[in-house]
Amino acid sequence: MDLKDILSTNLRRIRNESGRTQEEMAHVLGISLRYMGSIERSKVSPSVTLLGKFAAALEVDARDLITPVQRMK
């Protein structure tokens, strides 16, 4: 899994856990809903600045967005 895939998976999971919709996140971050969806589908990579904004909006450390989650077997 590459970094873009890790980011999209973690972003979607953390956003869902926080109870926020893609539309809410897009509005808070000042990006289009289409771009938000593209990030979560791993079609595009956000800038480092936007990565920081995601972390701040979700109240997590940016590392939480780019660190692979270890799955239990």
Image (cartoon, helix red, strand yellow):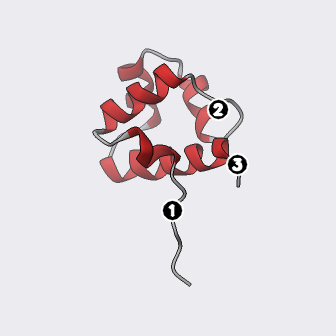
Q: Secondary structure at mark 2?
A: helix
Q: Residue 33: where, in percent of width, then height?
A: 53, 24
Residue 72 vs residue 20, the one in the foreground? 72
Q: CA distance from mark 3 to mark 1?
A: 13 Å
Residue type beneath disc 1? Val
Residue 69: numbered disc = 1
Are dots 2 and 1 in contact, CB under 8 Å?
Answer: no
**Residue 58 image-quadrant placement:** top left
Q: Earlier in the sequence, mark 3 or mark 1?
A: 3
Residue type beneath disc 3? Asp
Q: Residue 42: where, in percent of width, then height?
A: 67, 40
Quadrant of image for the C terminus:
bottom right
Name the residue carrying label 3: 2
In this picture, residue 35 sits left or right of residue 22:
right
- At a point 28% along the width and 39% down the height, the residue shown is 59
Q: Secondary structure at mark 3?
A: loop
Q: Earlier in the sequence, mark 2 or mark 1?
A: 2
**Residue 63 image-quadrant placement:** top left
- At a point 50% along the width and 50% down the height, the residue shown is 10
Q: Residues within 10 Å of mark 2 (few under 14, many from 20)?
A: some
- At a point 39% along the width and 25% down the height, the residue shown is 53
Give the residue at the far left of this rendering. 59
